[in-house]
Amino acid sequence: MLKWEHRTLDSMLAQFDLRPERAAALRVCDQFALHLRITQWLHAEVNRTAELHGQADDAVEEQEAAELVIGKVRDAGTDAALAEHMAAVRQLVTQHVAGEEKSLFPGLVRGLTRSRLYELGAGLQQTKEDLAAGSTDAPSRSRRQNDQADTEE
């Protein structure tokens, strides 16, 4: 799912390159912000997994940098400022995608069982649906954690 979202961001950036208009820039920013909210949940789950602890430590800084640049895109008063800030968005997207696809995802595949990977995928999908439905909070616990809590009670 996340790789598909990465390709979507790449495609949207290419569309902005063809037509560098504010509306296209805002669509990229909205999609990137949503994607980062979804991956926040994944990074929290990764940091709870002993085998992968620390692999997603830069997620908070990445989110803050993205929010800052996205704010600059939204406030850009000229085409030149828009282009400049979108170049920074492109750089952040490129770094984000490379970090996940070259390091985090392979680490997940090596460090987790197939069933745990499936659980993470289901959690990501649920998080995306919750955010799309307007929920301001991503699920704080995975289904696995909920199931474990239920069996302990």
Image (tube, rainbow, N blue to C red):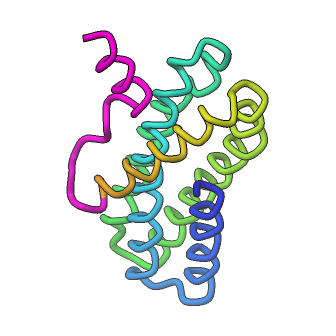
Query: Which quarter of the picture shows residue 10?
Result: bottom right
Q: Position of residue 23 (x, y in %)?
A: 38, 82
Residue 112, compared with residue 125, is above or below; it is above
Determine if the magenta segment contains residue 129: no
State the count of labels. 0
Q: Position of residue 64 (x, y in %)?
A: 41, 38
Residue at x 40%, y 23% (from the top left corner): 145
Q: Position of residue 143 (x, y in %)?
A: 39, 33
Magenta-tinted stretch: 132-153
Determine if the magenta segment contains residue 134: yes
Residue 48, compared with residue 71, is above or below; it is above
Quadrant of the frame with the C terminus = top left
Q: Position of residue 130 (x, y in %)?
A: 29, 53
Q: Residue furthest bottom?
A: 19
Quadrant of the frame with the N terminus = bottom right
Residue at x 44%, y 28% (from the top left corner): 144
Decide if residue 2 is on the left or right side of residue 142. Answer: right
Decide if residue 83 is on the left or right side of residue 69. Answer: right
Query: Which quarter of the picture shows residue 16?
Result: bottom right
Residue at x 59%, y 32% (from the top left corner): 116
Residue 32, compared with residue 150, is above or below; it is below
Decide if residue 69 is on the left or right side of residue 74. Answer: right
